[in-house]
Image: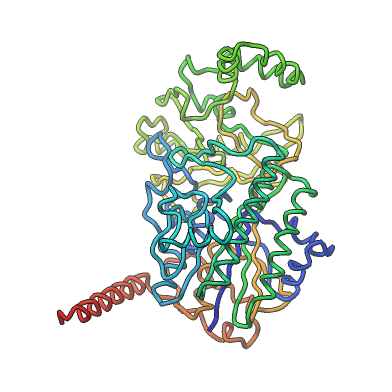
Amino acid sequence: MTRVLVIGLDGATWDLLKPWADSGELPTFKELMEKGSWGGLRSTIPPWTIPAWDSMTAGKSPQKLGYATFMVKDGYKFVPYRLKRARQELIWDILSEHGYKNIVANLPNVYSSKRINGIMVAGWLNLGKDDLAYPQGIMEEISSFCGEYMIDIFDVDLEKGIIVSGPQTDKEYLERCKSLFKNHSCAFDYLINNKEWNFAFLVFVTTDRLQHRFWKESVLLSHYKEIDEWLGKLVERLDDETVLILVSDHGFGPVRYTLNINELLLSKGYLRLKKEDKPNATNAVFRFVKKSRLLPIARKIIKLLPQKTRERLIKKARPVGLDKLNIEWSNTIAFAYEPSGEIYINLKGREPHGAVSIEDYETVRDEIAKIIESLEYNGDKLRIKVLKKEEAYPGSGVFDILPDLVIVPTDDGVQAIDPKIGHGEIITRNDGSFGNHRLMGIFLAYGPGIKKGQKIEGAKIYDVAPTILHIFGLPIPKDMDGRVLMDIFEDDSEFERRKPKYVDPSYYERKKADEKLKKAIKNLKLKGKI
């Protein structure tokens, strides 16, 4: 019987993997590319963890999901997406309903485990250890074999969508990542070697964590070599009925320019603050010190100050987010919240204190997009890519909660967005020593029925779910936005001969209802009631 094993490498990019594979640094990746089908995997817009993993596992675009970022707009507040949208039916739910055994471990979009036909371990957005894993007792089983299970290198405040604690020094950061990879690779090995499964989806997040902090070959190559070695051992154990798929939720690259988006909107009069929240003298002094390269001296002086004075100074000088600003909403035209590049228009009839009429909506969007696209740094034009809502999310409406404009990270534009106020500059020049997300992730398929040495083009993140359903011979719900990646299958293979079958979403709803009825009848028979 066919099995599918999906390994997720959060943030992996062919920009790193292919040169290292070609040079022989990553022999397993090289072998998989030569004996499988591979290519880029276009992520969601913006290319962020949420909604990317949801789009991948639901087969749906952000527009269909109803959210484009982790924090979604609720008036002028922003709340975690899970509070505003119902949980989607994901690939393992469909497979469970058809009797397939599943192992799902460490996917970032799984914030709490649920009952499936198999095993589920939640990812780093987990709400609490009580619902970390299903079934009961599996976490103790894993921990007895691998040591106490680690969720991530950070602790996250899920209500605010921010990291609240984690490693402080580079050394501690590297050590935590190394420990996390060792812990997760052990857990994954234990599950796939000792448990029954037809479908498994396992995700490593250390790739993302390291690339955010260090865009250095010495650090990243060392880690990918660890992954390559683990993959090599995994491939040796695969039987001739298992299809292996490697994916990432988005790509990655170095950060050279950061756009401080609310600083721009503030400077152009689109964002208005009440008088008490306007940048203060303390901010100006710290900005001058930073630009004058006097920061090391200033730090030494600050350390000599009384603790309360020191804390007060640092607090005043630190850039602050939208949620901590006293905004004059009735005179605000546009605003941004997350570091993912989304911009919202303060539209009348949609926002509590809207200032832009529906007649002016298009003009305002055009103005803001033009300003952003014309930005320069020291006379050098930045080729910043800005998309309107309907370009990023076809079929979206003016009055939904999706962003009105989205800035897409590109190598020749800006690579990071900072919504905080207090930087004192619109564009921050970075040295490229740390990384951030890009639009193009990775896809690779290897195993029986898969073409060898095939480079594919045009794959999108929501093509993964329908392709997996097709491999299992299951019909694809018509509300999935993705397509089956038919070009990965060998000519005349079972997968290639089988034509994709599409069904109304109610097909699976009816099937689920039928299964519940069968179970209820079976239970009644066992109790002697019928």
Q: Position of residue 97 (x, y in %)?
A: 39, 73
Residue 398 appears left or right of 423? left
Residue 169: which quarter of the image?
A: top right
Q: Is residue 42 visible?
A: no
Tell which of 234 and 439 is nearer to you.
Answer: 234
Tell which of 222 and 480 is nearer to you.
Answer: 222
Picture residue at 56% right of the left edge, 33% below the top: 419
Q: Relative to 343, does residue 443 appear above or below in the rendering?
A: below
Q: Which residue lies furthest to the right in this view?
A: 23
Picture residue at 28% right of the left edge, 73% below the top: 516
Q: Where is residue 140 in the image (x, y as percent from the top left)?
A: 48, 58
Q: Can residue 50 be seen in this view?
A: yes
Q: Position of residue 16 (x, y in %)?
A: 75, 56
Q: Relative to 337, does residue 281 appear above or below in the rendering?
A: above
Q: Which residue lies furthest to the left in this view?
A: 529
Tell which of 414 and 370 is nearer to you.
Answer: 414
Q: Relative to 75, does residue 391 appear above or below in the rendering?
A: below
Q: Residue furthest front?
A: 144
Q: Relative to 206, does residue 465 appear above or below in the rendering?
A: below
Picture residue at 73% right of the left edge, 63% below the top: 228
Q: Where is residue 304 in the image (x, y as percent from the top left)?
A: 67, 12
Question: Quick one: quadrant of the C terminus?
Answer: bottom left
Residue 295 appears left or right of 143? right
Q: How is the image coloured?
A: rainbow
How many marks the image carries: the answer is 0
